Image (cartoon, rainbow, N blue to C red):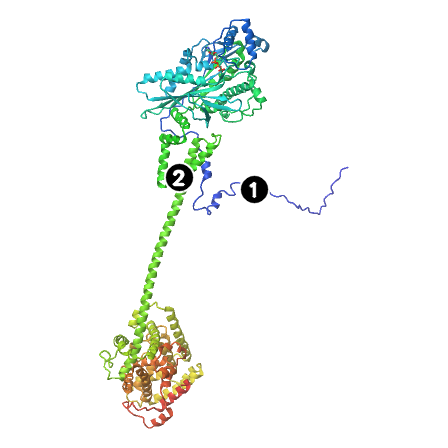
Amino acid sequence: MEAKSPSECPNTVTVRRNPHRRARPTPSASTNPNPNVQNSNMKREISSFPIQDILAMEIPEKNPPEPEPAAPATSESLKVYLRIRPIVTLKPDTKDQKNFRQRQKNVWPQNPSSKNNRANVKKNTTTTSNNEVCINVNDSHSVTLSPPASLQDSKRIKSEVYEGFSHVFASDSTQNEVFEKMVKPLVDDFLNGKNGLLAALGPSGSGKTHTVFGTPREPGMVHLALEQIFKGVQQCGSKLTREFKVSVFEIYSDRGKGERISDLSPDGGDLSMQQATIKGLQEVVISSAAQAESLIACAMLKRTTAMTNTNSQSSRSQCIINIHSFVRDPDIEPNNVVLTIVDLAGAEREKRTGNQGSRLIESNFINNTSMVFGLCLRSLLEHQSNPKRPLKMHFKNSLVKPPFNEYLVAYEFAYSMQFDFIFVQLTRYLRDYLEGKRRMTLILTVKPGEIDYSDTSYLLRQASPFMKIKFTNVEEPSIFLNKRHIEMLPRVEQAKKMKCSGRYARVTEEEKSVTDEHPLLPKVTKRIASDLISIALAKPDSDVLPRERNHQVMQNFAKALWNVLKQYKEKLMVAEREIQSLNEVIGNEKTRYHELEKELRDFTSCCSCSMKSSTMSTLINMDTKCKAQMPNIKDPKCQNDSEPRNDQDVFAEALECSTTQKIEGICGHDQNIISKIQESDHFLNLKTSECNGSPRKDREATPTKYDSNLRRDQIYKTEENVYSLNFKAFKCGGSPRKDQDAVHLKCDSLPRQYQEIFCQTKELAHSLNLRVPECDSSPKKDQDVTKKSLDPYESFKEVAFTQKCSLDVPDNELQPNSYCKPSDVFKSKRTPLPASSILLRDISLGIEDENIFSQTKEHVHSLNLGVAECDSSPKKDQDVTKKSLDSSDSPKDVAFTQKCNLDVLDSELQSNRICKPLNVFKSKRRLLPASSILLRDIPLDIEDESEKIKGNRGVKKSAAIETKKTQGSISLLRLLQSNLHV
Ligand SMILES: Nc1ncnc2c1ncn2[C@@H]1O[C@H](COP(=O)(O)OP(=O)(O)OP(=O)(O)O)[C@@H](O)[C@H]1O
């Protein structure tokens, strides 16, 4: 019974817990079409070495066009010749037949030189004479192979026709005939600069050695070829432009341990093969055919041979003869050609040879060599017929697993001996031929006997298709010869030869241009090249990295390296330019530093001069006053005191006349005080030079940059003080008013202390105004000025500006009617007028109450006395006072006097009796209105004087010596003194 699933409730909603996920889009190139863009910002300034690009470079298989005119590619087919050994007649003899049968069992090689063996061989050759032949020559290019009758009946083997041979030499053909039809064309090509190879293939005893080397009576192809070569050279001319060298070596089996190479030249020894090159092979220079014959005869004596059942002198090695042709005359086109003739060892079957042991191993080597040689040609043929099929490199040192071959019984033994691989050096040496790059000619030698049917049939079946091989890509002879010859030379000579050839000339020219620009490049590339070459040489398989590919890789490597070096060179140049610009900046900074240092030095010297001049100016001021008091002292430059002079004149004279006169009379203690005055005065001068634009010597000499911060701070402090006072003054009112109520209203916002002062001042002003009509000499204008000056607002304003004006305003700019307005404080610093000077001026000009002025005179006189004490000079107070209060000179002098009085504390004045401008800034915050200071310094006996003054009104101005005070002035002074706590 099937279990039914519960029916779904109609009202329920099924919620899928794991909804279907959408398949992720397949990552494609569109997601990141250009991944390099992302990394573009991360691009390095100097790219890394493009080793991957170099390795990925596609190098064409064919070399670039050669400098020599390339010969047209010839499409030639491999020529295969067939030679049939003559049949040897053997007379039947029972005794010989017995011996033959016995020798068939004796597989060991026997010395053919022995009489018995010689007789046996002779008998053996004759025994086959009666056998039927299995091969019949149809024509010069075809043969018919007929199996024996026994095989035809049992295995139904039919006759086979092999055609297409270049030529079929019948058994009765002679050596000359073979030479003329087969070797002579090769020799002609050889003399014409074409390389050639003649290889003899065939079973053992088929006549290969006889065909190649021959006998003294029937010389072989080598002998005939050499004769032909020298004959042709002699026919060309008396001058021999070619040089021929002959080398002969053999490859044989070293008792089954491997292949060995032996030089068959008279002084030759064992050789070694390295990349299809025989190292140490001697090349004997041959100048005649006789020398060649003797060399060949010597080589044949050295060649490894052995007697087998099939051949009394069976060759047990592969023999290679090279005939090289070199050009002696450099004017003639280089044409180095080689003609190679190979006599292979004949394959043999164990059954027939009866070899055993090491001889059997030797047979395996021979058969394997023949088989690999045939496989190479078969692979070439298959590759040519079907290019898709790769060309098998059987000539390489690789594992060769020979297939089962019923005819090559030796393979069975090889398998039984567990030979895993077989090294074939012959095919490696003949690689270029087996790859179809060189022309090759094969001559197949066969035995026509009936018993040789199997060997003949096998050879024809295997080798007859080789005639279809075509040489379409035959290398240019001279280049190939150069390469071959270069490979046989030591490495140093190879390099020399490569440089001499035009092919590498272009490379050397490029490298030379590169090396000229960068001398280190050759060493680097040479080192890398040597490393790569050593690596390549260390590899047994040289085909993986061919020499030409190495060269091109090295060439590309050099180019890439050169590009990298160029990038680094550009980077280095940019860095050098930056360094140069930085050096220029450093030089400019040094120059600027020196200029600043020079300015500092000048400024330091100017500071000292300024301080000195300032001190002198202070002293001059004091001296001027002293001289005003001491009219008896006459100085030619300082006498013109009556004339109005400005500060410039005073300073100029101070520099000239005061230095010698004043400093000398000052004691040591006073000199210290004066030095302090110099310092303080220096700062005052600085401030003055900053505030106004009056030309002064010290200002001109003082750099504007000197201690600007300090000076600016001082100015700010002063301005702050002034501003605070002005601000308070502004609170009082913006304009002077005569109305007392208005003054009170305005002064309500002021502190109480100042309010009292204003009230009292107002009273004083009122009293002064009351006396104005009584004043005879004071004009109305001055009365207004007096009123204005006594106005509380204006007085405060003037007091506020006193500090600044005393510091900022040059004396020559002080005008009687100039006022410092609050609005002009920061606009113009040249116009303010000290309130005290205005007060004194007004009073001296328009107010009859001369008591105040007398007090002021006394105060000034007391100051001058203090200065005079320093100078130890006589003084006259009255004159000085008169002069200071003179209408023309009073502003100037009062300003100077006020400058000292405003800034100096009473204690200091009492102790030192000298103005100390040094304390100006210390006591800056304690500055008092000028009027109060004046009143403070004036010794008042208000009460007494007031009483005395009564009834003395209307005293003339000329009687100024008497200290008479009006009631208003007394009250004013009293009020000021009491409020200011003087
Ligand atoms: N065309 C020929 N005319 C006369 N004698 C020949 C001819 N060919 C071969 N012979 C003789 O046959 C014998 C064997 O010949 P040869 O040694 O050349 O055979 P092979 O193929 O070289 O044998 P292997 O491979 O064992 O060396 C030699 O004695 C040689 O004189």
Q: Earlier in the sequence, mark 2 or mark 1?
A: 1
How packed is label 2: few (under 14 Cα within 10 Å), some, or many (20 or more)? Answer: few
- Measure the C-alpha gap from mark 2 to mark 1: 54 Å
User: On the picture, is 336 further left or further right than 19?
Assistant: left
- How many numbered circles are shown? 2
Amino acid type indicated by mark 2: Lys
Q: Secondary structure at mark 1?
A: loop
Q: Which image quarter is the N terminus in?
A: top right
Q: Quadrant of residue 669?
A: bottom left
Does the beta carbon of the residue at mark 1 sit less than 8 Å from ligand 1? no
Q: Which residue is mark 1?
A: 25
Estimate the x, y position of residue 855 in percent, counting from the top left: 33, 87
Of all residues, the one furthest to the left in this rendering is 636
Front one among 147 and 40: 147
Front one among 162 and 448: 448
Is residue 172 visible in this depiction of the protein?
yes
Q: Is residue 428 above or below residue 526?
A: above
Amino acid type indicated by mark 1: Pro
Q: Which residue is mark 2?
A: 523
Q: Is residue 216 above or below residue 572?
A: above
Q: Secondary structure at mark 2?
A: helix
Tell us which disc is closer to us: 2 or 1.
2
Of all residues, the one furthest to the right in this rendering is 1
Front one among 323 and 763: 323
Estimate the x, y position of residue 150 in percent, counting from the top left: 57, 8
Estimate the x, y position of residue 537 in percent, counting from the top left: 46, 32
Q: Which image quarter is the C terminus in?
A: bottom left
Estimate the x, y position of residue 969 in percent, counting from the top left: 36, 89
User: On the picture, is 934 further left or further right than 640?
Assistant: right
Does the beta carbon of the residue at mark 2 sit less than 8 Å from ligand 1? no
How packed is label 1: few (under 14 Cα within 10 Å), some, or many (20 or more)? Answer: few
Q: Do the numbered discs 2 and 1 sit on residues whose CB atoms are within 8 Å?
A: no
